Image (cartoon, rainbow, N blue to C red):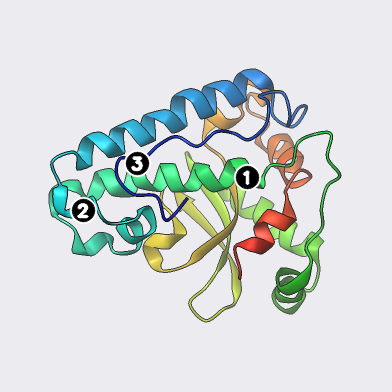
Amino acid sequence: MLSQKYPFVLPPLGYANTAVEPAVDARTMSVHHDLHHAAYVNNLNAALKTQTTLHDRSLGELLMGLRRWPEGVRTAIRNNGGGHANHALFWKLLSPGGADASIPSGRLAEMITRDFETVEACKAALKEAAMGQFGSGWAWLVKTATSRLAIRALPNQDSPLLEGELPIVGIDVWEHAYYLKYQNRRADYVDALLARINWTVAGDQVV
């Protein structure tokens, strides 16, 4: 997805709206993907329509090189480009409810053991960041520029790519991601998502 260029397109979920129930209900999935994510894509395309010099830049390049682009489109790239990139990974990280929950393996498992000691400790750190995020934002497991794993709590739709860090696992804590089902029970939502992480997809991000 990070290689996608203008005009950007909304990726399909890859599964039915009901596939991640009960962690994420079908109505929330539909609103979140079909409306919110689509809006980020549409707004990014609108902002870049006249910026023809940026049309050959990939989504990853736009985010990682944000400070190099015209000042007038930086906010749109940060917010809408970040929202597009964040969600494109988020959908892939959710294991359908009928699938066996995977566990980290290979290089990612080695890195988690090195930097967190256990998978449960890694999940606990992610949950702490998700619960501590004031207002809208994300909790991220990232790979740093020095190839270490770290936890980041980022506001709004900021992507770890803005700081040169690679997103591995993201937990969306915008209210539209959970409020229809969980209301103010953010902790229950975070627990449900952490139980459905597709660690195979997460592992693909560290290669």
**Residue 38 visible from this viewpoint:** yes
Mark nearer the N terminus (2 vs 1): 2
Percent position of residue 135, x then y: 48, 39
Three-letter amino acid code at disc 2?
A: Leu
Mark linked to residue 54 = 2
Q: Is residue 35 above or below residue 11?
A: above
Quadrant in the rendering for residue 192? top right
Q: Mark 1 or mark 3: which is in front?
A: 1
Three-letter amino acid code at disc 3?
A: Asn
Mark nearer the N terminus (1 vs 3): 3
Check disc 1 and report the residue beneath it. 92
State the residue at coordinates (76%, 71%). 106
Percent position of residue 113, x then y: 77, 75
State the residue at coordinates (39%, 58%). 60
Q: Give left or right: position of 54 versus 27.
A: left
Q: Is residue 150 above or below residue 4?
A: below
Q: How many marks?
A: 3
Check disc 3 and report the residue beneath it. 80
Could you give the CA–CA distance between mark 3 and mark 2, rounded to whole angstroms?
Answer: 15 Å
State the residue at coordinates (42%, 29%). 38
Mark linked to residue 145 = none
Could you give the CA–CA distance between mark 1 and mark 3, rounded to whole angstroms?
Answer: 19 Å
Q: Give left or right: position of 101 versus 9.
A: right
Could you give the CA–CA distance between mark 2 and mark 1, rounded to whole angstroms?
Answer: 27 Å
Three-letter amino acid code at disc 1?
A: Lys
Location of the C terminus by quadrant is: bottom right
- Determine whether the residue tagged by mark 1 lies in a helix, strand or loop: helix
Mark nearer the N terminus (3 vs 2): 2
